[in-house]
Image (spheres, rainbow, N blue to C red):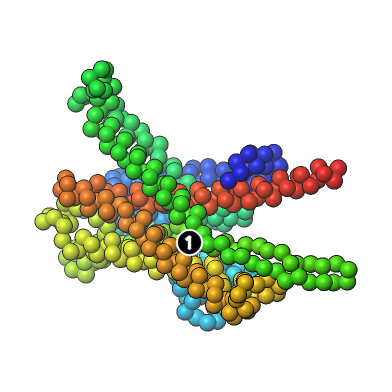
Amino acid sequence: MHFKTIFKSLKNKDMLKRVMAILGIIVAYRLLAQIPVPMGDASTFKEAVSNLMEKSDFSNFLNLISGGGLASFSIILVGLSPYITGSIVVQLLTKAIPRLEELSNDGESGRRKINQWTRILTVPLAIIQSIAYIFILYHSTLSANLATDFTPTMGDWALSVTAMTAGSIILMWMGELITEQGVGNGISTLIFASIISQLPTTMASLGASLFDTSQGSLSLFGWFELPVNPVTFWIVLGFSIAMLIVIYFLVKLNEAQRIITINYAKRVHGNSSYGGIKSILPIKMIAAGVIPVIFATAFLSLPALIGQVITTFDSGNEFGAMLTSVFSAPSANNFAAMYPNGITGQWFVYPAMYFLLVFLFTYFYTSIIFNTKEIADNLQKQGGFIEGVRPGIATSKYLSKVVTRLDLFGALALGLVAMLPFITDYIFIVVTGAPIGLSISGTGLLIVVTVALENLRSIDSRALMITYDDFRNESED
């Protein structure tokens, strides 16, 4: 990264305008997270949300990507989940229907049509999820005797669902506005901002526990005592070291790539010659980035939401209870209730499905963003070729073979990184009898590191382009 170049580029009005626009959108996003849903007493529903988050991994994931919007019962409660689900559905259909696949390969106009269909599909999905969550939360308050004095009318239901749907659509629009600035993916940036926004609360809670010396303080070699809780201090130190190690390997995995040398044939036109040079084609080991993890978590968590809706209608429904149980991630909150006899075979079902989905989505999403046939055709048109490989179809097959091999290692690495929180939980279950509950925290760390690197790379590229233009203009003057 060229950090000096990035800071220098901020002197450029266009670059500064883009950065300030993104920061303004993020601030507006965080303000939306403070606007409550117009549905009775917000504090009452916040308590119901707290109870719901203890039972559902989807609720925790939703709260994660909405920046605490679920926990605060705000109008962005549903967040980006409908757009993510809509993207999964449309991309699956694109691969399944040849006509849509042709459209996706039809340049920018085809991609715009597919993006438009994704936006259209997001609206009914947002409405359905808004109705489901309002229904579940309201009946949770009734079952807990939290809102017996409030009976919503049809107008209350319509207003609440409309507000939540509008909040989800606004977030989708904000994400696209950020993408248009050309310094990172908008949806990933909003999710990144959501996770980072929860750090102050976490740090404040951790700080309060660390400096609570009611049970004693830390003695340093018997010389003097530090005013910190000794147990919390060693736990924080251990996890800080572990986190730094994980971040280091995440950066290495994200930066790993295969370099393919591209040769350009020498052409003679009149008295001038062109080509005869070499270039490189970098292929990342994890070209899909963090998208497979987000897709897998959203896709795998939806059955738990369906199971909760079913059990809300019929508390004794075995199918709904089965969906909620099987598709809920093992965590510190639900471990004692779900596994009273300790670890059983069911404990491994969710982690195994999670690993498999991350693995499959890595292959699937890489095939979408890295079109080997299109790259081979462009190289052939430009007179480029890979040494020892014929241009055209042979080049496409060669690139497909390289990408498939990279995907194998990339998908395994990404799946294992996604499994780290479950491995940590398993170790703590064996040692202490209960998990520590880092499933969502591990996902959040993976998202933060990957998105930060991708955005820094985008900013670095634009900064290099801007400073080059400035240097050229100064030379001409």
The image quarter in which residue 199 lies: top left
Is any part of residue 326 visible from this angle?
Answer: yes
Residue at 75 percent of width and 48 percent of height:
469
Q: Is 112 displayed left or right of 120 in the figure?
A: right
The x, y position of residue 69, in whole percent, is 40, 48
Q: Is 83 displayed left or right of 387 in the figure?
A: left
Picture layout, residue 316 above or below residue 146: below
Q: Is 346 displayed left or right of 83 in the figure?
A: left
Picture layout, residue 375 above or below residue 434: below
- Quadrant (top left, top right, bottom left, bottom right) of the C terminus: top right
Residue at 54 percent of width and 55 percent of height:
185
Foreground pick, 418 / 333: 418
Residue placed furthest toward the front: 388
Disc 1 secondary structure class: loop
The x, y position of residue 5, in whole percent, is 65, 42
Residue placed furthest toward the left: 341
The x, y position of residue 124, in whole percent, is 45, 66
Residue placed furthest toward the top: 223
Residue at 16 percent of width and 57 percent of height:
343
Foreground pick, 445 / 177: 445
Q: How many marks?
A: 1
Foreground pick, 312 / 229: 229
Q: Which residue is mark 1?
A: 285
Picture layout, residue 263 above or below residue 198: below
The x, y position of residue 266, in whole percent, is 76, 70
Residue type, label 1: Met
Is any part of residue 170 visible from this angle?
Answer: no
